[in-house]
Amino acid sequence: MSHPALASGHVAVVTGAAQGIGLAIVRALAARGLTVAMIDANARQMSDAVATLPGVSLLPVVVDVADEGAMMDAAQRIRRDLGPVHVLVNNAGVTTRGGPWGGVDAWRRNMGINLFGVLQGQAAFLPDMIEAGLPGLVVNLGSKEGITTPPGNAAYSVAKAGVKVLTEQTAHELRQICGDRITAHLLVPGYTFTPMNFPGMSDETAKPPAPWTADQVAAAMIDAVESGRFYILCPDNEVTPELDAKRIAWAAGDMIEGRPALSRWHPDFAAHFTESASAYNQKQSYCDPAQNREGRK
Ligand SMILES: NC(=O)c1ccc[n+]([C@@H]2O[C@H](COP(=O)([O-])OP(=O)(O)OC[C@H]3O[C@@H](n4cnc5c(N)ncnc54)[C@H](O)[C@@H]3O)[C@@H](O)[C@H]2O)c1
């Protein structure tokens, strides 16, 4: 079933649109005939990205999603230039590191972009989408780090856990006020071949076998939205949906079974998890902090 917001001639807004998953989502929406307002903080990356999209109906807008006033101004400009918005994808994100008792400035930046950037995207666009009475779609970018919360970057895990809860609340509130006219979804990529994981990558950079491409994530997003799924958990070429399910159930089980926090990485429990997960596709040490990079959670 196709989602009514994903129709040719409709208007989409994608944040963090100048590279990686955001740019792949722009391509996927443009291929369906949507006009896309591309929001990104990096002007040079934006012009490089636009140059890769000849003939596509676009409005590039250089804005920092962490700047509430600038996001409100951007929303006004997009409405004025393109008309009512049908699709909002809050994708902009950074991996700025902050530990459990340090790096407060990094925490502020991380939360400002990864959590408040999503909230400000919704605040800037959703009231008008609700008011317009048109079909609508909101997709927010979560992370497995916000679900199984592995050690290594507390700030990022907290921000992405916040995006998960915010998106669940958004979906519920939208359902109360407009039924299924505007739907909200949480997109959770697996390990993905983007500059976030491969800084400085170019068209010549060879993709290693493990990650998915950003285009695979964008295609999975469209498929899942069209089949009405709220949680859009992407696997990758190492982590299967079954292993993800095992990890999520284990994390929830910490509370139910009375295990220590983050027991998957606790010396008394890690081996037990590894053993029980081996029926799935265990290929790596779950206690190796080097594995703690985005998407390999
Ligand atoms: N790559 C992965 O493996 C992976 C896995 C899970 C979740 N995610 C999430 O997916 C999203 C996209 O990730 P990606 O890998 O494409 O990242 P990326 O770093 O390759 O691209 C992010 C884009 O966001 C833009 N951006 C950063 N801060 C911004 C700001 N303040 N305002 C506006 N734009 C800003 C950047 O300029 C860049 O164009 C992020 O939210 C990330 O947390 C990525």
Image (tube, rainbow, N blue to C red):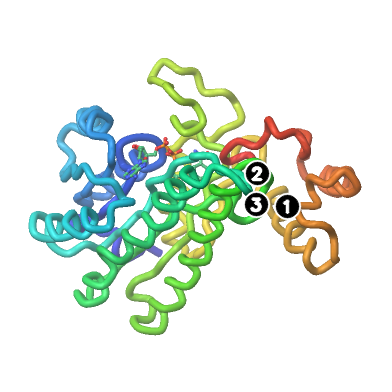
Residue to which mark 1 is pinned:
247
Q: Residue 12's spot in the image, x, y percent?
A: 25, 55
Could you tell me if the residues under marks 1 and 2 are in contact, i.e. CB atoms within 8 Å?
yes
Residue furthest to the top:
204
Q: Position of residue 81 (x, y in %)?
A: 8, 55
Identify whether 173 is placed above or below 249: below
Quarter of the render that holds ligand 1: top left
Q: Where does label 2 land, which residue?
A: 297
Disc 1 or 3, which lies upstream in sequence? 3
Drawn side of residue 119 relative to residue 134, left or right: right
Local crowd size for mark 1, using a 10 Å CA cut-off: few (<14), some (14–19), many (≥20): some
* 3D distance between C-alphas at marks 3 and 2: 8 Å
> Given the image, on which type of amino acid does mark 2 rest?
Lys
Real-space Cα distance between discs 1 and 2?
8 Å
**Helix, strand or loop under label 3:** loop
Evaluate whether residue 279 shows in this view.
no
The quadrant of the image that shows the N terminus is: bottom left
Mark closest to the chain's N terminus, 3 or 2: 3
Could you tell me which residue is drawn at 24 percent across and 46 percent down?
63
User: Which mark is drawn over residue 216?
Assistant: none
In contact (CB < 8 Å): disc 3 and disc 2: no
Q: Secondary structure at mark 1?
A: helix
Q: Amino acid at mark 1?
A: Arg
* Residue found at the far bottom of this picture: 176
Say which residue label 3 marks.
149
Residue found at x 81% / y 52%: 263
